[in-house]
Amino acid sequence: MIIPMKRFRSRIMTKAFPCLRCGAKTVTFLFWAALYVVVMKMTILKSSGTTTTKDWSVPDNYTKWLLQGPVLGEEEELDSANNDWLEPDNATVMELEQRVAKVQEVCHLRSLSTQSINSKEFFVDHAHNIVWCNIFKAASTSWLYNFNILGGYDKKFLARTRHTPLMLARKKYPRPSEEELKDAVNTPGVISLLVVREPFVRLLSAYRDKLENITPPYYRKLARAIVAAHREAATKVLGPIKSFGPTFYEFVAYLIAKYESGEISFDEHWAPYYKFCTPCAANFTVIAKVETLSRDSAFVVQQLGLGHILERKVRNRRMRLRTVMNKSRDGKNTSALLKYYFGQLDEQMLDKLLQIYGIDFEMFGYKSDIYRRYVRK
């Protein structure tokens, strides 16, 4: 019997390589199995993410901020699992009273009691008896969210809108005049709130966000000007510099030069607290801190009876997310970042930087001694 050449080859191949077909089938099976697993995972994660967003009712613009991670860890105190706004304990109330007293003491010692009020960054909510000065890089996102809810924005609308939280808030709360602001803060029953953060942690966070990566157009222009003025001196100290944006050394040199020239205006992201929110003129009744923001905010909410509007469940989970993400975008913790960046400075530069921000440290009870260990000797 004569076997056709094509069938003969097929038989030979089958006998010689009995596992080829088997292997091909195995590879095909593994491919479709892997694809199935990937699709299932993506579907489950997507479904879970959608459910989470709906449960938390957090607007997209806030969600993006959370997922990116803070530029520098905010080190907020983690809330308890309880969904209610708990009554503040006596220790918290006493601490808040001591903070207000300390501000007033420093205002007197530094002869700032006659300071004129700066109403530019204040939000006045007459309906809910609260006044707040918005300090950028000090829980501004958190309290802008609160004010947008108090202003009547629907959470579903906030989840869809592309407008920034600040723009939305300003539509509800236009900048007050000096007279309106003074009347508001002196009205009985009104809480005037200021939230602060360790001054140099905020300064470094602002630098990394606005200048180190040079993303917004305005700060690109500023970054180029800083590099042009201070790169030569920085290279002598730090060696060859590859970055297009200014180093922290150059940024601090820029701040010092600006301060020594007598120019009193600073960018809103790194302006000293005592000048930006003028606490010696505004007479704040609550001085909250980012480091204890959860319990400090709870005090304000309890005092004003806003718990039914500012749902605890939403804030609790947002706080938990931010606390879990208490690292910078590159995975380094706050202490490591401070040590690295302030290690570019020497003691003379630190002394001059404290001339700018020293009153903030003193007024709000922060310690600057640790930075002596970070700077170059």
Image (cartoon, rainbow, N blue to C red):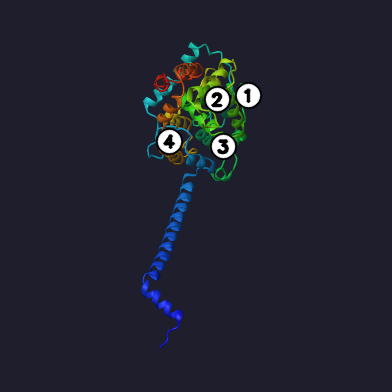
Q: Quadrant of residue 319?
A: top left
For residue 231, which numbered disc appears in the image?
A: 2
Crowding at label 2, few (<14), some or many (≥20) Cα neighbours within 10 Å?
many
Which sits earlier in the primary sequence, circle 4 or circle 1? 1
Which sits earlier in the primary sequence, circle 2 or circle 1? 1
Q: Are marks 4 and 2 in contact (CB under 8 Å)?
A: no
Q: Please name the amino acid that badge 1 sits on.
A: Ser
For residue 165, which numbered disc appears in the image?
A: 3
Q: Quadrant of residue 31?
A: bottom left
Query: The N terminus appears in which quarter of the rendering?
Result: bottom left
Q: Please name the amino acid that badge 4 sits on.
A: Lys
Q: Please name the amino acid that badge 3 sits on.
A: Pro
Residue 172 or residue 334, whichever sits in front: 334
Distance (Cα) linking label 3 and label 1: 22 Å
Which sits earlier in the primary sequence, circle 3 or circle 2? 3
Distance (Cα) linking label 3 and label 2: 36 Å
Crowding at label 4, few (<14), some or many (≥20) Cα neighbours within 10 Å?
many
The nearer-to-camera label among 4 and 1 is 4
Where does residue 227 sit, x and y in percent of width and height?
57, 26
- Position of residue 185 relative to residue 139, above or below, is above
Distance (Cα) linking label 2 and label 1: 42 Å
Q: Which residue has dot 1 on it?
A: 177
Which residue is farthest bottom? 1
Residue 195 or residue 180, whichever sits in front: 195
Q: What residue is at 46 percent from the left and 79 percent from the top?
A: 6
Residue 194 seen anywhere in this rendered image of the structure: no
The nearer-to-camera label among 3 and 2 is 2
Which sits earlier in the primary sequence, circle 4 or circle 2? 2
